[in-house]
Image: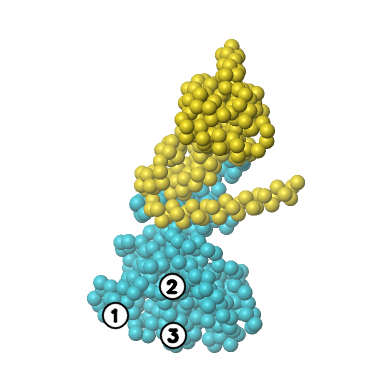
Amino acid sequence: EKWAATRVKHPPTSLALQHFDATYNVQLGQLWPSVRCALLSERKYGALFNNFSQDAVLADLEAQGCRDFIRDMDTEGRRAPPVDTEHQQLPPLWLGPDIRCLVFPRGDITRFKPARPDTYGLLGYYLMDAASVLPCLALDVQEGHNVLDLCAAPGGKTLALLQTQSIGFFCVNDMSVSRTLRLRKVLHSYVPKQFLIEDKLRVTSFDGTKWGDIERNTFDRVLVDVPCTTDRHSVMEDDNNIFNKSRTAERRRLPQLQLELLMAGIEAACPGGEIVYSTCTLSQIQNVSVVEQAICLAQENHGIHLQVVDLQPLTHMFRKTFHFAPDLHIGEMVVPHLAANFGPIYMCKLRRLT
Amino acid sequence: TLQVTQHNQEVHHVSRRSAPELSLHSLADMGFSETQADCIYDAVSKIRGGSAARHALSALTALFVLGLNPSSVLKVLEKCPELYTVKESQLQQRTANLRKLGLVEGSLQRVVAHYPQILTVPVKTVKRAVLFLREKCLFTAQQVTDILRDSPATVVENMGQLEYKFQYVYFRMGVKQAEMVKSRLFRFTLDEVRQRHCFLERRGLYQTPDKNGQTIIINPKLDGILHVDQDTFLTQVAKASAEEYDVFKRLMAREWREEEQQSGGLEADSD
Ligand SMILES: C[S@@+](CC[C@H](N)C(=O)[O-])C[C@H]1O[C@@H](n2cnc3c(N)ncnc32)[C@H](O)[C@@H]1O
């Protein structure tokens, strides 16, 4: 009786799994069983180190066996990967290492303890999927940049970007009011007040798809971290699950919403500016296809010419920590693996040439 | 029962022949070599209590009666020295009970050789286990005999654990009694079974059948999951790397430990 216990007939988690079995089996082929098993098993976290905190957490975490995956790059990664064009190399002033994210080594399943506040009440680290830091690194913020985070709540990536302390003006947006409140709370638990003043940082709750109507050709960097099927959540938690029957329409509309958000992000960027599109799904329709359509639409409807920036130099450096999907047509994707159970994270970087 | 009485008579007969003293000489008479006799003699003299020698004799004879030869008898006693201290009447009752449960000559001999502890288990305990297998798990009498023959240690397993294991395999894996017996399921612990099953399930290679016993994929057979070494399991069945399985096992161990702590806590609360 214990095993036959009354269960909901088709809980959203099983619907999600059915859906993924059907689509990812085709998309990932032989890789799918391994990714599936990782998705259904306990994930790994990374501790985004808070540069603003006064605590000696770093030494403490390192003593527990963690390492900052951003500094601990694959040494061979420094050697130029097989890319020839010089503008595709990392810029000399790469601020990535201002962001630190600690992880337990491959295969180590130790969990992080919750962070504790320091004497000023600021927390020492923020626990998030370590792979979520990659889109922030890919964004490659430079000193004085105007940056827009279009879908920012609950704020993990915002916080990672703030660690560089080099953003000129930071626009942080999320349409959901309640989630924006959470984001504000997060910011106040990690960042000193003087960095959160209005002329440096603005938190808004606009519909991101309309951003192009408000502010065009403005930002040096735009992060478009869209809502998606959040694959890991969808197979693990029945609460707030997008595969719930009642949310079918919303789920079907996701690729369209994603496209509109990316288009708004592209319009918000200035010519020469760079946009990073990211999701936490493996779905081709929500990843590569959205980017491809955006590139076309930008050209056709707005005369904006976009260039896809090769992220391989970046992913190459971190292949010790993450498993990347092979042969992606556009962009890069971290696929979950039991020994390095991060992701899924898809990211693609675009540069506005006009 | 006729057979059983005959055996009992035989036991008495043998006992009388070698009684009352346990001596190197009497051991040699029973067919033990000098070194074997020394071993037994040493082992018995280490056991405290006046009745040790007498019980030892009855144990030896009981084992001979099962048809074991001297070297197997010695091996059995080395595996389970406890047998030296079991009363003759108890040994008789226990073997008789096992025979009644269908373990006839050859099988009983093999079972005792393989798992001599079976003779230290009270008849009552064995009966309870058998009743459990028949009534709670709906195994047929023949299937119960097969279980006793293939996995005699089942009789001493914790009933709660046994029930959990049965239900797991029956409901979660959708395996029926006949296949459980055929694949000698009860040789494995619940953790061994569910470790492999969960791994396959999460990889999408095993499905719980629906009400009509249907699955979308073809599940591997229980036997093919359990009776292969880890390498074969990984390369042939799970098609996964040893690294993945290693991490998986550690994750599961932690998951189950935490589940147990939680449910343990709940039970304590409801008490
Ligand atoms: C994947 S989450 C962002 C996670 C966040 N970047 C982080 O790293 O913590 C997607 C967010 O998009 C927001 N969102 C959904 N539709 C939106 C829209 N039309 N405009 C702006 N934000 C939207 C949701 O409220 C949600 O918080």
From the image, state whether disc 3 or disc 1 is nearer to you. Answer: 1
* Foreground pick, A162 / B145: B145
Dot 3 or dot 1: first in sequence order is 1
Q: Quadrant of residue B95?
A: top right
Residue type pointed to by label 3:
His
Q: Secondary structure at mark 1?
A: helix
Name the quarter where the N terminus of chain B is drawn: top right
Residue type pointed to by label 2:
Phe
Instruction: Judge whether residue A6 can be spotted in this image.
Output: yes
Q: Are marks 2 and 3 in contact (CB under 8 Å)?
A: no
Residue wearing tag 3:
A145
Q: Residues within 10 Å of mark 2 (few under 14, many from 20)?
A: many
Instruction: Please determine whether, in this image, residue B5 is positioned above or below residue B162.
Output: above
Chain on which label 3 sits? A
Q: Quadrant of residue A324?
A: bottom left
Residue wearing tag 2:
A69
Rendered residue at 43%/49% (across/down): B203
Residue wearing tag 1:
A87
Q: Return the x and y of residue B69 as percentages of the image width and height.
A: 47, 26
Residue type pointed to by label 1:
His
Q: Residues within 10 Å of mark 3 (few under 14, many from 20)?
A: some
Distance CA(mark 1)–CA(mark 2): 25 Å
